[in-house]
């Protein structure tokens, strides 16, 4: 088959493939152009496996079954192996009579008349090979065909290399954006109360250890902020911090997100996908609401922690990963173990170090600081000239139980800023959820007064000095009232 290939045609093909920026689309287009231009009957492309550079995988093929591809590439004497080992192109004008293929049953059995195979390589590395053949006697390849295929393969290899690099950069960019969107540039943890000082000390002590850490606490207490602080103050800070919310996520979706999947592993798996364990290599993976994962995921998670290896769904290949695991839950995880909902061995693997986040009601001294931070944030965001929160409003906020913790306080301040009509936020602008303890409506003022005092003391865990401050009375007055009700004096 004589082939006249003007440079203009090769240039047009080069421009066409270099305009494609999706690797799968690019490979399909390369295969189609090769067959079309050479008038070949069949063909396929092999590329080095990204995770194991000593092996190759078929990434696209035309008019040939996988069984036929396997028989062609797997024999030690095969066309493809000769090209991959030598790094040189191969042409057979008459494959049936070619002594080089005397032991290659695939050539004989499939009645292949003419064969060409050439490496796909750039100046710096080998990527794989492109193979084409013809079983029609009238369409035998010649030296001109090979010259074109070599020139074409050079352009194709460069396009593949550039597209892969672009996709790697896009993936890294997505990771960075994900970190920024989901948590900002590491928002400061706000608070100077005694419970928060203990948290800061603990973060400083354990941040750079290799231990897995379990962060426990009610929803809205800032567990992810602590996880980010642990990562930022560790030697892994230059590597990814990837958070994933495990609660309410379907098991198969969570499995695919954590461990990745192989192309064709299930309906919709149209391409190979790396899991978060692979993407977080050398960094930190934060598993939020870990108590909600299924037993199947628990078993696979335990293997990753014990062996340092992960396996994609539908794949048999093990991949080594070095990932620090931080996890969080708003449940009592040990009770989940006792109830049979969580593996005991996994519990001890995750809970090498335990950090318990205090609820907002246990650190009401931090409410003025938090309010000032949220006030500034939402005044700027909503372009409102709000400067402060009144002392009466602060006392109201400190007297509330905050079942939603810091997140609920932030929402309350944001709402107050939006509805503010002056530079100061008063107590009337704050609408909190009703407390679980209901006011004794229909009772005397004396009974209501007693109820409010006792609930406030309960909220601050019996600290009567703090209760007196919240109620706006002297400690002496509060002690007098308690004495009248026959309550023993306390702190």
Image (spheres, rainbow, N blue to C red):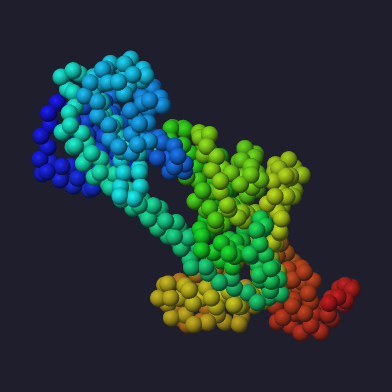
Identified at 63% across, 49% down, the residue is: 290
Identified at 70% across, 50% down, the residue is: 349
- The answer to whether any part of residue 134 appears in the image is no
Number of numbered discs: 0
Q: Residue furthest front?
A: 99
Residue 30 in which image quadrant: top left
Identified at 44% across, 60% down, the residue is: 176
Rendered position, 491 above or below 112: below
Residue 370 in which image quadrant: bottom right
- Give residue 440's position: percent from left, percent from top: 73, 64
Assign the N terminus to one quadrant of the image. top left
Assign the C terminus to one quadrant of the image. bottom right
* Residue 320 in the figure: left or right of residue 450: left
Front position in the image: 116 or 205: 116
Identified at 15% across, 45% down, the residue is: 11
Rendered position, 154 above or below 282: above
Front position in the image: 85 or 141: 85
């Amino acid at each position: 088959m004589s082939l006249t290939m003007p440079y203009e045609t090769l240039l047009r093909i080069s421009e066409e493939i270099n305009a494609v920026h999706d690797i799968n689309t690019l490979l399909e287009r390369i295969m189609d152009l090769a067959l079309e231009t050479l008038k070949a009957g069949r063909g396929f492309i092999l590329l080095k496996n990204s995770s194991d550079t000593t092996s190759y995988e078929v990434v696209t093929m035309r008019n040939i079954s996988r069984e036929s591809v396997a028989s062609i590439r797997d024999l030690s004497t095969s066309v493809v192996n000769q090209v991959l080992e030598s790094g040189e192109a191969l042409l057979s004008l008459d494959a049936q009579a070619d002594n080089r293929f005397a032991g290659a049953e695939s050539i004989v059995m499939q009645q292949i008349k003419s064969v060409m195979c050439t490496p796909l390589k750039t100046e710096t590395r080998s990527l794989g090979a492109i193979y084409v053949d013809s079983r029609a006697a009238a369409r035998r390849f010649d030296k001109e065909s090979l010259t074109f295929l070599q020139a074409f393969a050079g352009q194709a290899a460069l396009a593949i290399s550039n597209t892969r690099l672009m996709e790697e950069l896009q993936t890294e960019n997505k990771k960075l954006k994900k970190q920024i969107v989901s948590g900002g540039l590491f928002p400061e943890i706000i608070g100077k109360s005694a419970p928060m000082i203990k948290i800061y000390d603990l973060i400083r002590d354990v941040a750079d250890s290799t231990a897995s850490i379990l962060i426990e606490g009610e929803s809205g207490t800032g567990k992810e902020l602590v996880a980010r602080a642990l990562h930022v103050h560790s030697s892994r800070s230059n590597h990814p911090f990837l958070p994933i919310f495990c609660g309410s996520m379907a098991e198969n979706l969570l499995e695919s997100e954590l461990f990745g999947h192989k192309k064709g592993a299930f309906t919709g798996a149209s391409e190979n996908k790396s899991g978060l364990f692979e993407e977080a290599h050398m960094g930190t993976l934060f598993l939020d609401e870990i108590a909600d994962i299924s037993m199947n995921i628990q078993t696979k998670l335990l293997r990753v922690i014990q062996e340092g290896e992960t396996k994609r769904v539908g794949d048999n290949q093990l991949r080594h990963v070095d990932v620090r695991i931080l996890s969080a839950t708003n449940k009592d995880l040990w009770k989940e173990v006792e109830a049979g909902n969580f593996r005991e061995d996994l519990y001890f693997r995750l809970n090498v170090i335990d950090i318990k986040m205090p609820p907002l009601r246990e650190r009401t001294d931090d409410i003025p600081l938090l309010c000032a931070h949220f006030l500034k944030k939402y005044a700027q965001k909503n372009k409102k000239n709000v400067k402060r929160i009144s002392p009466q409003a602060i006392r109201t906020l400190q007297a509330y139980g905050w079942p939603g913790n810091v997140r609920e306080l932030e929402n309350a301040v944001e709402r107050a800023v939006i509805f503010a009509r002056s530079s100061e936020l008063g107590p009337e602008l704050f609408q909190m959820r009703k407390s679980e303890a209901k006011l004794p409506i229909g009772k005397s003022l004396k009974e209501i007064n007693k109820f409010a005092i006792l609930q406030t003391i309960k909220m601050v865990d019996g600290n009567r000095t703090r209760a007196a401050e919240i109620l706006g009375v002297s400690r002496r007055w509060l002690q007098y009232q308690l004495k009248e009700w026959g309550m023993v004096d306390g702190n």
